[in-house]
Image (spheres, rainbow, N blue to C red):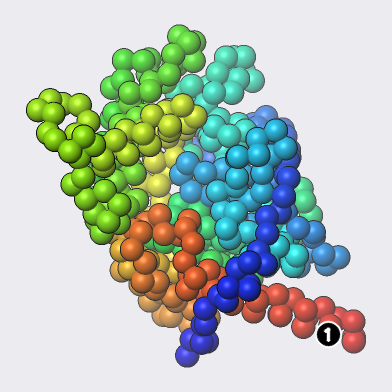
Amino acid sequence: MLPALGFLTSSLLESMSSVGIVAPLSHHFAEPLPLQNGTAIADYTLVYETYGKLNADKSNAVLVCHALNASHHVAGVYRDQPRNVGWWDNMVGPGKPLDTDKFFVIGVNNLGSCFGSTGPMHPNPVTGKPYGARFPVLTVEDWVHSQARLADVLGIAQFAAVMGGSLGGMQALAWSMMYPARIRHCIVIASTPKLSAQNIAFNDVARQAILTDPDFHGGDFYAHGVVPKRGLRVARMIGHITYLSNDDMAEKFGRTLRTGEYQFGFGIDFEIESYLRYQGDKFAEYFDANTYLLITKALDYFDPARQFGGDLTAALANTQAQFLITSFSTDWRFAPERSHEILRALVNNKRKVIYAEIEAPHGHDAFLLEDARYMNVLRTYYDGIWNNILETSQRGEQA
């Protein structure tokens, strides 16, 4: 039976605060990291941030895995960029569901990203020139192995929890299978055990927009001093449509015309067109085209049941963690039915698992937004983890 989950009170909401000013950290790895494609990458750097304090026995560490266009900057702000708020700042901080007064939280920027960790825009140590298209294609499993190496550097033998939404949820699920003894709780939000054919199709159309942009130059656009903005813009517009629900778009934009009249041309008539173009333009200013290709391929390739003949129960048989699986009613990109697949496989393996399906109108993006029921599910679950940490610590003191 699931525990009763109440609602956040206004006083709790008012007490929430940010972790404040934060700064990124980095660690360089000289030893080659073997990759799933049969090659390896050496001399790479991972950028990360931490929030809260690691306790004496290092039992309160939580790893937060990021989704496609996010990064290590999970919470707080930068001193020189006060408007650059962490992408999950509503989730992580003092008094928030993942409470940094209790937990030591780590956000890692994945390899291949464009936010600090070694990626296509960085110099290849062999040639001295940007990797560009020669940066290796990575998988979710490769990212998890690199995160485990960083955990070793930080002296964390076991995480209290590994947590992520969307692509981050895939990484959390992979952690539970690849390093079962190093994770006590696995929190998978708005995710899936593998992409559907429709999702792969959306990703390929987005990639084709980039690959066919004349400014892409086969991935070596850095040397030409250009950015394939047209391709990035279209890729983001395609992706953004899939992150929203039809009801959400209807409520926000409907068929509202910008001028109140048809323009009888191919410019912007509708408010939804204006919104999507704005999102595309903004994305093209800060995201790297090669990174977009790499990350969408990692999404496509994630399928842990593949090596077990499609049997997800067999794929999850070696897991040891307890699980929280959360989905959203209007998320049609990673629909609740996909979370049900994970849930069934865990139940088949007699794992301890809590499942929460949240009624929310915002589609896939709901995992990033404020919703009292959703936030309280996470708060209640983390309270349980914290109570277990305290009980274990007290038993150790008594012994």
Q: Position of residue 266 (x, y in %)?
A: 15, 26
Badge 1 element: helix
Question: In the figure, 383 relative to 332: above or below?
Answer: below
Any part of residue 325 in sight: no
Q: Nearer the viewer, residue 4 or 133?
A: 4
Q: Position of residue 333 (x, y in %)?
A: 31, 55
Q: Nearer the viewer, residue 361 or 335?
A: 361
Q: Quarter-wise, where is residue 182 in the image? A: bottom right
Q: Which residue is mark 1?
A: 395
Q: Residue at x 42, y 28 (%)?
A: 284
Asked if residue 271 can be seen in this view, the reply is yes
Residue at 64% of width from left, 20% of height from top?
A: 125
Q: Quadrant of the C terminus?
A: bottom right
Q: Is residue 61 left or right of residue 143?
A: right
Q: Is residue 257 left or right of residue 143?
A: left
Name above or below for residue 342 compared with residue 138: below
Of 326 and 152, the residue lying toward us: 326
Work out whether residue 215 or residue 322 is closer to the camera in this orientation and state it. 215
Residue 265 horizontal side relative to residue 65, left or right: left
Name the outermost residue toward the bottom: 1
Residue in view at x 86 percent, y 65 percent: 56
Residue 176 pos. (x, y %): 55, 64
Query: Which residue is pictured at 52% across the width and 87% down the height?
Result: 3
Residue type at the position of mark 1: Arg
Q: Residue furthest top?
A: 224
Image height of 388 relative to 61, above or below: below
